[in-house]
Amino acid sequence: MFIWLFHRISGATLIVLIGIKIFTGIFLLPKENRPDWALSLHRHPVIDILILILFIFHSIYGLRTVVIDLGYRKEKQLFWISNIAATIISIVLILLYIRFS
């Protein structure tokens, strides 16, 4: 139940966060008169990290759903494998983001 709910919430949240990135990016297209709020919101590291984490977990949970649909029945084991994999991938990518931003 948790993964089903998280998958739905993370999908909706990703739509909003990526929408914010696109919306603020439109305001940053002209070279002159760039609004400060759009620049600060577009380059905000919390939004970038949230998108990163939600994307990783949403993708891993989607792959988990596909594996279950293909007939794998050890859902509890798959739950822990998917959470550990998503956590490790998220940590590595966050560290890379912090290092290179």
Image: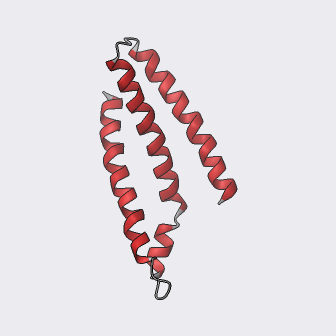
The x and y percentages for residue 41 are 46, 69
Image point (52%, 65%), residue name:
44
Q: Nearer the viewer, residue 1 or 32?
A: 32
Res 26 → quadrant: bottom left
Identify whether 62 is placed above or below 74: below
Image point (47%, 51%), residue name:
50
Q: Is residue 88 left or right of residue 69?
A: right
Identify whether 74 is placed above or below 9: above
The x and y percentages for residue 74 are 41, 12
- Marks counted in the figure total 0
Which quadrant of the figure contains the C terminus?
bottom right
Q: Nearer the viewer, residue 28 or 43?
A: 28
Which quadrant of the figure contains the N terminus?
top left
Furthest residue to the right? 99
Image point (54%, 28%), residue name:
84
The x and y percentages for residue 77 are 46, 16
Furthest residue to the bottom? 33
> How is the protein colored in the picture?
secondary structure
Image point (45%, 77%), residue name:
29
Identify whether 77 is placed above or below 2: above
